[in-house]
Amino acid sequence: MTKMFTSTMFKDETFRDDYTFANSPESIKRFPFPFWEDQYNYSVNIEPHVPGPKGSVYEFPIDIDEHYVSDMRDRAIVLKEDPLRVQALPHMMTAQWDTLELLMTSMAEAYPEHFTLNRNGDDWHWINRPLGIEDRFRFGDAATLPYEPMEYITRQCQGDFAILDHRDNNLWMDAGIATSQADWSLDFDIGMNFMEWHAPVPMAHDMGIFDRALKFLLAMQYGSPVRRLNWTMTINPRLDTSPENYHKWGKDRASVTPENVGDKVHLRVELQGLWRLPRSNAILFSIRAYLLKMRELVTMPDHARRFHRILSTLPPELAEYKGLTRYVDVTRDWLAQYDDGEPTPKGFLFK
Amino acid sequence: MIIQTIKSRPTYPGLQINPHAKANLIAVDADGREGIAELSEKIDDAVIERTTILLSTAGLQEEDPAAALGKMKAANVWTFPTNETLLARLDIALSKARMGTQLYAVGNEPLLAEVVQLGMKHGIPHPAIGTEHRGSLRRRVQCVHCKGITENVTTNPVTCSHCGLNLLVRDHYSRRIGAFQGVCIDAEAPGEAPEQKVEFA
Amino acid sequence: MSAAPSRQVEVAALERVANRVKRFEFVPCDGQPLPVFSAGAHVVVTMREGDRVFRNPYSLMGSPFSTDRYQISVLRAPESRGGSAFMHEKVKEGTKLEISQPVNLFPIVGTGRKHLLIAGGIGITPFLAMMEQLKATGSPFELHYGMRSAEEGAYFERLNSLPGVHIYREDRSERIPLAEILGNQPLGTHLYVCGPQGMIDWTLKTAAQEGWPEDNVHYEHFAAPPPGEPFLVKLAKSGREVKVGAHQSLLEALEQAGVDAPYLCRGGACGQCLTRVVSAEGALIHNDHVLTDEEMREGKLIATCVSRGTGCLTLDL
């Protein structure tokens, strides 16, 4: 239906099978390293999602990078095998349109060389050059698009998304797409509220993290989006680490040796954005994964030092919850050679 | 005794009859009958007269399983051989119900799960559905891999009745699906799994 | 202040729509489209007169889909603390005002199957926008609108013969037969009430008596902060002192003094303005709906938008 071609800007790589994914030097430099001190602690760590430094992952509201075309190809494979990875409850259609509008306008404004959006009232014309997509449709009329609005635009935008309905003083995950998730099931979590979908996270509930976060998010206003970073680790640059396929990728966790840490072990950071949507009053939650191989990480000495120390002090319950138990020790030991004991700079290493 | 180990694991506050409800619908299973008996001693006859009781007799061998309930002066006592047939009738009753109708369920968790699902399907916000757990702790489990639901789960782990994977039964629960999550327990080290022991008697 | 940046607007039109009610149309000064909004939303209008600042929330009553102008209706309150008097007496065509981004604390419930709208007096305003939104999504609804008389009731002419709209005029002894209406609704109906506090209380009580769960009942009330004795506020961080006048809220006094104090609803309902109390010489007078009884007794927090103190109060600002 749509012809995909790879321009020279975008890499042609895989996130499964032969796993050819790798980061260019620029991509390594701009990786959102999430640790601002040598020990990891939970915090609400929300900040305004305002334009960041040029070239950084924060420069634009939505970040499209060199992995874009391959990422979207992987998404299409996941959705073909498992349509339940994208769902929307019936009352969320207005929020879906809000989402389409936000993502399309963000992408067209930030990357005019790749995306064009022309609007004449409700008659919209969208061109996505990297993916070879061109569509004319009526905004508000789902019959004029090949997919429902959220699926349509998220098939063209990096990151998983959840649309949260705001009602009864709570947020409800009533729509979303998850093809690059770190081990949670969209199908299972659809319909849950904020506390419920966060239920499996250890320690944070007792610390009041989620109570404060929910209160903050309920008060979020249109025009003032926020962002935060979350992290975990993955073996092989696999985007689809879903519970649905866990019985297929789970054994990779037991395949790490001192010789292959550099290539197999990845730091996985999620840049999460939150926007208040205008027509539906819902909140859009983006979960944008970035992968960095250990051998790529250690090309940056401050990062290498700090991450060694993070892993050395990580509480076992956190390691367990993040699925790191089988390989955290061998990874930490491998990183030790890059930790000369010198102090690391205060604050975020990435500016 | 149900303990909320994690925030998505439901707890059931117990039946608190709303005296202002214009009509009450109460779904009960074998273990739940005891709950109804206790309740009937606490509420007005006027309220009982506005109440319809739906009883699932699944698993019972008694001659007259609704005997005790029949003594209450409820508007109706309907008996069904299975949860499924009870729910089919409840679906019809809810489609005709007006606002001011109160829905309740008493018994094992699977019954509570399916009554809440049905109530939500008819637009009742789930906090407005009264629930009380009685008896067995057996669970409905959804296999995250094949999406099949395995009923009457008492062991942990459990074999998925659809795809055959050996599943860890988590406490993470979906109200929409009405089941706990089951995840392959030996994905990281295939073949290495603990014995299937009874955990939800 | 509330976090989101505000917009400069100009009054493009205004008209009297009832004895004590005026309608205002705002267009953006920069010519850029105004945001679409969700029905039930309000904007906080900032009015300046000399060195006095007034801020009042007003429901957006126009279609949520119109981006070229916003419309509000203002009831001239008999004991206006300045805001509604300013709007009625000082605002003309061409007057420039500041408005916040739309904020919605009274949205339509997406999972509702049918929507019952109960309006009292100026409480009609959010429902005008809601009806547009409900019509656009094809959702069934009914509006029941109680007014003192046709002369006092804003938009009587416009609404009188619309399908699904029922008007009740007090001067003709017409009352909303609420119990009867509530007794005949399908499961999944949600009820929304906006109007004077007494009407809200009566609606909530009737709904409970008709067996309606709380989850199906929603209300919005624009409470004016109650007046009281003047008192003094010390700001612990800056060392400044601010006097709070009798007819001025704590929040308004802070804003008057140029302090950037947080707020959202300005009506004691949302908790955004809760500020830490460092010490209090006298009593704290809590008028909000957010703090628990225990928290009010503890006296560690105060909702600056509606609550007051006596004597001298030191805040963590």
Image (spheres, rainbow, N blue to C red):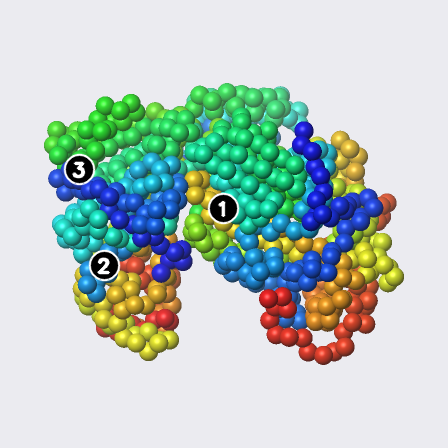
How far apart marks 2 and 1 lie (CA) works out to 33 Å
Instruction: Label 1, secondary structure: give it.
Output: strand
How far apart marks 3 and 2 lie (CA) works out to 24 Å
Mark 3 or mark 2: name the one nearer the start of the chain.
3
Instruction: Label 2, secondary structure: give it.
Output: strand
- What's under tag 2, amino acid-wise? Arg
Please give the chain letter of the residue carrying mark 2: C
Q: Position of residue A60 (x, y in %)?
A: 55, 54
| Residues behind callouts 3 and 2 on a single chain | yes
Query: Which residue corresponds to the image point at 34% horizontal and 71% vertical from the top-left?
Result: C315
Front label number (2 vs 1): 2
- Crowd rating for badge 2 (residues with CA inside 10 Å; few <14, some 14–19, many 20+): some
The residue tagged 1 is A283
Front label number (3 vs 2): 2
The residue tagged 2 is C48
Q: Toward which corner of the image does residue C157 lie, by quadrant?
A: top left
Quadrant for the N terminus of chain A in the image: top right
Rendered view: C183 above or below C291: above
- Crowd rating for badge 3 (residues with CA inside 10 Å; few <14, some 14–19, many 20+): some
Query: Which residue corresponds to the image point at 59% horizontal and 46% vertical from the top-left?
Result: A113
Q: Position of residue B158 (x, y in %)?
A: 76, 40
- Crowd rating for badge 1 (residues with CA inside 10 Å; few <14, some 14–19, many 20+): many
Q: Position of residue C308 (x, y in %)?
A: 26, 64
- What's under tag 1, amino acid-wise? Ile
Quadrant for the C terminus of chain A in the image: bottom right
| Residues behind callouts 2 and 1 on a single chain | no
